[in-house]
Amino acid sequence: MNRREFLHVIGMAAACGLPLAQFSGRAHAQNAAQFYDLPRYGNVHLLHFTDCHAQLRPIWFREPNVNLGVADMAGRPPHLVGEALLRRFGVKPRTAEAYALTYLDFEHAARTYGKVGGFAHLATLVKQLKAGRPGALLLDGGDTWQGSATALWTQGQDMVDACKLLGVDVMTGHWEFTLGAERVRQVVENDFKGKIDFVAQNIKTADFGDPVFPPYVIKAINGVPVAIVGQAFPYTPIANPRYMVPEWNFGIQEETLQKAVDAARAQGAQAVILLSHNGMDVDLKLATRVRGIDAILGGHTHDGMPAPAIVNNAGGKTLVTNAGSNGKFLGVLDLDVKGGKLADFRYRLLPVFSRLLPADPGMQSLIDKVRAPYAARLGEKLALTEGLLYRRGNFNGTFDQLILEGLMAEKDAPIAFSPGFCWGTSLLPGEPILMEHLMDQTAITYPYTSVTGMTGETIKIILEDVADNLFNPDPYYQQGGDMVRVGGLSYTCDPNARAGGRISAMSIRGKPLEAGKTYKVAGWAPVAEAAKTAGGEPIWDLMARHLRGRKVVKPLQLELPRLKGMQGNAGIA
């Protein structure tokens, strides 16, 4: 599909009645063809998506209204939400772009502009952009093989096949590793061989420190040698079960990254790109300390950033971007490389609106084929929601709240914990909660539920530990994700306090939590290997039973901590 053909297809869609006047973004004319008609610039072209979490079909996805920044990160991207984010990037309110980037007026905007993402629609956009950008590379930042029922049930094969058809050129990873080291190797050495390069400079063998994957690959784009260096999620064995990758070590590994960049330059690379799954705060710090990287195309923290940050370092400047999540966006980075170095660039973060982009027939056929064997199970109606269900935000979301209530009810526990995962799709009021939607929130390879006796002291230690991961003033000590969701327990959180002093005033049913008293706590997704044999039922079985009995989910009241010291923070609405 060339540019002329693409514009013709979009024009035909408009003639069939799509509400194009509702898609008037700040930099585009009021029709879909011009919305996606992005002029080519320079001689090196990179397309980037990340953190799609196995969402093959268009979805609803509400962005957070709480994304707090502390210390040097306060008040700067990516820690901006709502109107603060729109002002910073010059995006007009009540537009399609504002809908894609923020939570503002989400229900109305969602019904106005439609669902986002979907690989069939993304494929159409990728083909259009590649047709107008000879030699363009498509880069996948990871968290691709996990996040849906079909990805779990096929061990990621649905996403592997979809990415091959999409035309991915280079990839790095994170949640992929929760399928196990053997499965990752199987895909890389067979499905990807000769088609997709899997790169990760920071994964080494635990015994001798040998590279597990190539640290980088050099590709020629219009005669310009470009190195793509891989940076997998550094804290995989901590945030996820260690037993799934027992023979691999991870980490940020600045020194080996610098060596990889230098080696790529020595091999003739005139541009060096870091395909990163660090999280944006980590990437911003990394960019000040490692020389020779022209751009970091980042992921993990799901931040949709309309423009890159430009970071100074000893070697010059580095662009730092993050391309959101769930297939909502495609980042387009055009570089002008002259005399062996970067002269200038253009960047756009394009929302993928399923109403504006016709589905690619070949990709749609693959998706339909993948889903067919599971159609009945995916389509089971568990309950009806009368309120908006979403996950995302530093402390809680309504779908998280629903899971907490299910855990407490089914396990007869006064307290429940649920992981602060960033992935998980949204549902509008009045929609049925299908088994597929429940799996969008819970589809992991360690889904076991549990009931544990914990002292009040232990509960505080857990909350303090997670809070330090989220709010440590040094980004290198942050692991991404959000605060553990807590049901039945009230507490106060001071994100600016020191480690060990952020959590206070814990109480249960109005009574202070006693340090020495043992409490019954329900939870799920334990990372300890012993949990595999403990016999805890999968969270989706527990929640499916709970929802079938509940039938209708009324609008939920979020259990949120009391915050201290966050007045005026642009990361909270």
Image: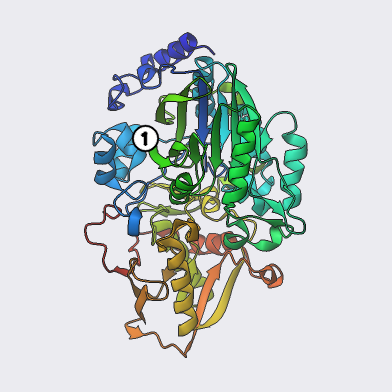
Would you place residue 509 above or below residue 322 in this image?
below
Quadrant hosting residue 101? top left
On the rendered structure, is 108 left or right of 272? left
Between 219 and 429, the one lying in front of the other is 219
Q: Seen from this angle, which residue lies furthest top? A: 4
Would you place residue 388 above or below residue 463 in this image?
above
Please say whether residue 68 is visible from this viewpoint. no
Residue at figure coordinates x 67%, y 34% from the top left: 197
Would you place residue 568 above or below residue 91 in this image?
below
Image quadrant containing the N terminus: top right
Residue type (three-letter) at the residue carrying disc 1: Ala
Quadrant hosting residue 355? top left
Between 536 and 452, the one lying in front of the other is 452
- Give the class, few, some or many, for how many residues have Cα within 10 Å of label 1's Cα (few <14, many ≥20): some
Residue at figure coordinates x 73%, y 41% from the top left: 187
Q: Seen from this angle, which residue lies furthest front? A: 314
Between 282 and 411, the one lying in front of the other is 282
Between 39 and 451, the one lying in front of the other is 39
Q: Secondary structure at mark 1?
A: loop
Residue at figure coordinates x 25%, y 45% from the top left: 84
Query: Which residue in the structure is indicated by mark 1?
Result: 307
On the rendered structure, is 377 left or right of 573? right
On the rendered structure, is 484 left or right of 140? left
Q: In the image, residue 504 lies at what x, y percent?
A: 35, 78
Q: In the image, residue 30 lies at what x, y percent?
A: 29, 20
Please say whether residue 435 is visible from this viewpoint. yes
Q: In the image, residue 217 lies at what x, y percent?
A: 65, 33
